[in-house]
Amino acid sequence: MARTRIFVPRETAAVSVGADEVAIEIARQAKQRGDSIQLIRNGSWGATWLEPLVEVGVEDKRIAYGNVEAADVAALFAADFLKGGDHARRIGPTIEIPYLIRQDRWTFWRCGLIEPLSLDDFLAHQGFTALQKAFDIGADAVIEAVKASGLRGRGGAGFPTGIKWRTVADTDSDQKYVACNADEGDSGTFSDRILMEGDPFGLIESMALAGFAVGASRGYIYLRSEYPLARSILTRAIETAREAGWLGRDIRGSGFDFDIELHLGAGSYVCGEETAMLESLEGKQGIVRYKPPLPAIEGLFGKPTVVNTVVTLASVPNIVNLGGDKYAGYGVNRSTGTLAFQLAGNVRRGGLVEKGFGLTVRELIEDWGGGTASGRPVKAVQVGGPLGAYLTAAQLDTPLDYEAFTGIGAMIGHGGIVVFDDTVNMARQARFAMEFCALESCGKCTPCRIGSTRGVEVIDRMIAGIDREENYDLLVELCDTMEGASLCAMGGMTPYPVRSVLKYFAEDFSAAAETDV
Amino acid sequence: MNRVRQQDLGTPAPATTGTVEIEIDGLPATVRAGTSILRAARESGVDIPKLCATDSLKPFGSCRMCLVEIDGRNGYPASCTTPVEAGMKIRTQSDAIATLRRNVMELYISDHPLDCLTCSANGDCELQDMAGAVGLREVRYGFEGANHLDAGVDASNPYFQFDASKCIVCSRCVRACDEVQGTFALTIEGRGFQSKVSAGISEDFFDSECVSCGACVQACPTATLMEKSIVEHGQPEHSIKTTCAYCGVGCSFVAEMKGDQVVRMTPDKDGLANHGHSCVKGRFAWGYSTHRDRVLDPLIRDSIEEPWRKVSWDEAIGYAAQRFREIQTEHGRKSIGGITSSRCTNEEVFVVQKLVRAAMGNNNVDTCARVCHSPTGYGLKQTLGTSAGTQPFDSVMDADVIIVIGANPTEAHPVFASQMKRRLRQGARLIVLDPRRIGLVRSPHIKADYHLPLLPGTNVPMINALAHVIVAEGMVDEQYVRERCDIDSFEAWKSMILRHENSPEQVAKVSGVPARDIRAAARLYGRAERGAIYYGLGVTEHSQGSTMVMGMANLAMATGNIGFSGCGVNPLRGQNNVQGSCDMGSFPHELAGYRPVQDDEVRGSFEQHWGVSLDPEPGFRIPNMFDEACAGRYKAIYIQGEDVAQSDPDTKHVEEALANMECVVVQDLFLNETAKFAHVFLPGTSFLEKDGTFINAERRINRVRPVMPPRQGKDEWLITQELAQALGYPMNYANAAEIMDEIAELTPTFANVSFSFLDEVGSVQWPCNDSAPMGTPIMHIDQFVRGKGLFIETDYVPTEERTNRKFPLLLTTGRILSQYNVGAQTRRTDNMVWYDADLLEVHPSDAEVRGISEGDLVSLSSRKGEITLTATITERVQPGVVYTTFHNPETGANVVTTEHSDWATNCPEHKVTAVQVTPASHRSEWQNQFDENAKRQGKILETS
């Protein structure tokens, strides 16, 4: 008789709320009871609020049990959960969870579904079919598909991926590189990590695809050091792929050489900026380079380099398999396709929501997030990481569309959405923006290096009520200086959250003084 | 006189050619394609503010002062990092830009001391200038915020200080250390507001890897890195361009002056040998010219046991002339002679050799090049036809494979080493042939592909083995050899080279270098598109020095590596004017331009011009002079600026020769070791007082300009002229320029050279005549000077100096960065902080079997003599080889070196001496004598 498959995610968020203990307990009790089970450590479906989300394979369905604790395991066995038995934790079939079925799973479709480190499982789920197809249709056709998809870089800048790839492909060089930016440092973001932990072969295939498309034989994954589990999973996956001939010389007889090296960051936020990342990859200090030259022309070690973030790259296999037009069918206007939004902060149902562009922030927060965790009214929402503007409650109906966000002085960035209720003091959030920049500035350019420190000081004076009007004007000018004169987006966008606070929450400066002890 | 203000165009010139049309502030401009907007604007007369950009460094884009607006582009691109494009319309000034620049400057000044009036950079500060340019009037942030005002001063370097409170973190110093000098000693530590310049890992400058080249000081736009002389004396008021008097790189400098006082020497950006770079010696170690040891009065004495007497110039010169004539009367015309100095100008050298030939009436003139590069002159003349290197320094930037043989450029030719390292960092490959693991073998971002640590004395078999592989494996450039070389000589050479004894496997046994490394290195050079050979005294100072020079020329000819940029056979000359002193006819057998004195036509032209008949017989070389003196036949000598008692081999023999002479006339800055044997001392001038020319290793004739009057009251050429006159020979130059005019008239390779021409064009590389009016950077283009390149067979005749049971180790000698040759100058500067004494490098295994530990006093003995010095245990030397420097007279390194010399030129075999090293408890007998002599001479001095 076939063993019952039980899925317990091995994903950082799930593990942080006890998934490992749950897995151990299930294995222990099954053994004790003599039940024949197959424990599978899958990735996360991204419904983080349900973690640890345990699934049991019953016939051809997977029955989900949410927020399982180790202490629940005995009761679950008692409730005959191996057959999908009822229990307070039981949610029902995974594929019927509304949070999931209402998504547009293009890039993350294998996350949660498969066993991340099983190459067989990956191959059984269309793994490497896009790369095989690419070998058949040729590099140009891959790039054309990406161009047709309208895919734009998901790291924040939103640069058209197909054009970038075309530039690298058309630049003559003895060596080219694919550099995957996995230095996911924005507050409230975790989509890269969920993908790397849940579908590592998917990223490997995506990078090989990029390498094939542009003529690069080496890829690097620049992974932030704060992701140890992703590191261990990627390391194993790269080895496995190499052993199976999916990486290395002459991949599967195609004549195409490609290999990947995993490189760990050292805790610097600015190394998520593509040129600082390249410096760091080269073994130097993570200092921003000026552009041009663009990395696509002079990138890693001075060679043409595709620099894309994890999610951007991982969107490509299905574009190759299903066609760029199909991807372009999602989204609105020039924001085609899907984005993996990440709901975090003061929200009831945090997690990853992959959805075509065009829905509103309110829909995300209310329909998926279920409102604030505290039950209090939303006061502000920061979209796009620590350099993103704060949206007011009145702006929540803004559609998630790159251009629409630019129109209100905001940005979508990497898709992180952090919700604040009405207890937040926004003057302190403005200060935090400057403080974050002061902590993380690489120190190369003056507006960012000195400006961010002065910004904290000016805001402190405003909060303290010292010459508040003069300091308000000075802060506005400082924001102009940082935005207009900084070398990279770090100093250039730090003013975004500050300006939104000055514009919409100016009264919080006096409030902050009152709450000051 | 005005200060030379060196223009800063902000970014380096682009490598591209061609021009594009752009518009700057509404005015059309034609600029070089690929130029930065910043440079294009500056070249068009529009100064865009800048702080982090400077044209010696790649653009960086950090200060954000040079922002501009470009039609059709968003935002405010930095003009330093944005290249021009055809049709670009640029605005360098607008209200928005003005506000941005002023507000960025406001941020700078919010973390900067407000002590401009008392700051050492007051009047020469780019930050100050820019604050003025952008109209900063207030700092609204106040000065209570976070700052670096208490960051402190690092004054550990003797020549410059680092005042961190004034640092604007533009990284120019860090980038200069990386890009210009190539030492990578500096870094930015920390990030964000905590970013700070750091030498090494939070070390002070002195303890870090800093080599005090001054590039960082040069690059600093504020008072952060500042010469202590400027801190002490203030800004200069005028300046004069001149040429450094240390090594053969011949760096151009701007002497920055207050009255007749030098307050700073700044490398000249227009200098074609150094392009604005410098080393610790040229940049900082010029204080010897005013050192208290300088002798400023002529001195005479009847015997060397007597005290010196200060006398007038007339008396000293008259006395010397009288003694010379008396001795000639008594011992014959050939019993006297002279030595010219490679430290002096061409004009000073030319008159000394002219004095010997025309006034003394013999050819007993030689030069200190005898002991360094005489084999270069001989070997390259025989094979190629010219006694000089083939390339300009800049040629190295085109080299694909570089071989460095017996040279230590990072110590001895630092400015050229920086250029070579720049090329190596661009990807050129490197082969080092040296018994020691010199700095180039491994240093930051530099790694030699092959280091062949051959035993001292085995250069010739090694070059033969390299050639063997190239011939045997078909890497000869047959077409080149056929078209350009003497084919018979090639065939003869080829069969010699292919002999079994020249195979790498056989040479491995002699040299100690594995055959596979020899083969690999040969293949690397043999297959190079452009291969360049650079060498130093590790080639020449051997009993086969000339053979080795010819061996290198053979190899370069066989591979077609002469006559193009990036190739060549390039001697790295040790002294500032060693090339020139040889060019000037300082050798006993050659008149100016390397033309034989026996040649009637050549000699005739000089006789006609000089109005005397000249001796057709070649005279004595330096070693012959000493031998003759010991034999009692050579009685008097006029020595211009060379300390033979310290620099020449077999010191005891030299001392005996000098003591045996009846009249030794020394012309020098200091009472050196030779002066202890002198009867007449004629005080000389330092380079800061000279008017003339030096010729560097690339045949570049550079102007030396006086920045102060002669401190002892007389130009050196005039001293020689007056001595000639006192000898009864009419010599009547009105100035140094007239001497050069005569050199040009008598020397075909100098025909178009004159001071006025040099002042006009800056510098020129000889030959410079009607067929090459602007000089000749690369020699032997299209054909060799001698016609067909001549291969000369290079059979290996080992030196007679061999190790044995009594003397089982080989001693080789060299130099260090902070000191220069016998140290007469550098020992009289603050460079002494880097140098306590000459050390003996001993390999750990040799040290262990002898019971020697780091810092022990050891005896170093050869069959010639014994000295004691301090041992340092290091793997830089290989087992069986020891190494020391010869910068210090009391070390007496040349007490142990031998009388062996190059078979062709008598260049001494400084580099190979069989020695024994044993623990010692006291100084050697020679050193005790030295001390006593020094004490006695000191007393004599006091009473003078």
Image (spheres, rainbow, N blue to C red):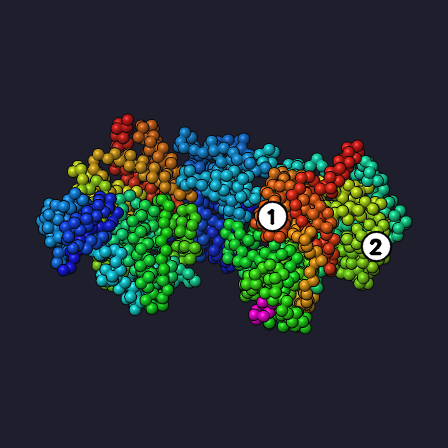
The amino acid type of the residue labelled 2 equals Asn
On the picture, is B888 further left or further right than B297?
left
Magenta-highlighted residues: B467-476
Decide: is B943 above or below A172.
above
Asked which quadrant contains residue B6, the reply is top right
Q: CB of mark 1 within 8 Å of CB of mark 2?
A: no
Choose between A53 and A96: the one closer to the eye.
A53
Mark 2 Cα shell of 10 Å, populated few (<14), some (14-19), many (≥20)? many
Residue furthest right as drawn: B330
Disc 1 or 2, which lies upstream in sequence? 2
x, y (%) of residue B877? 59, 51
x, y (%) of residue B99? 40, 40
The amino acid type of the residue labelled 1 equals Val
Instruction: Identify the residue at horizontal 80%, vertical 48% (top origin).
Output: B657
Is residue B324 magenta-colored?
Answer: no
Q: Confirm whether circles 1 and 2 share one chain.
A: yes
Q: Which chain carries label 1?
A: B
Instruction: Identify the residue at horizontal 84%, vertical 57% (top origin).
Output: B614
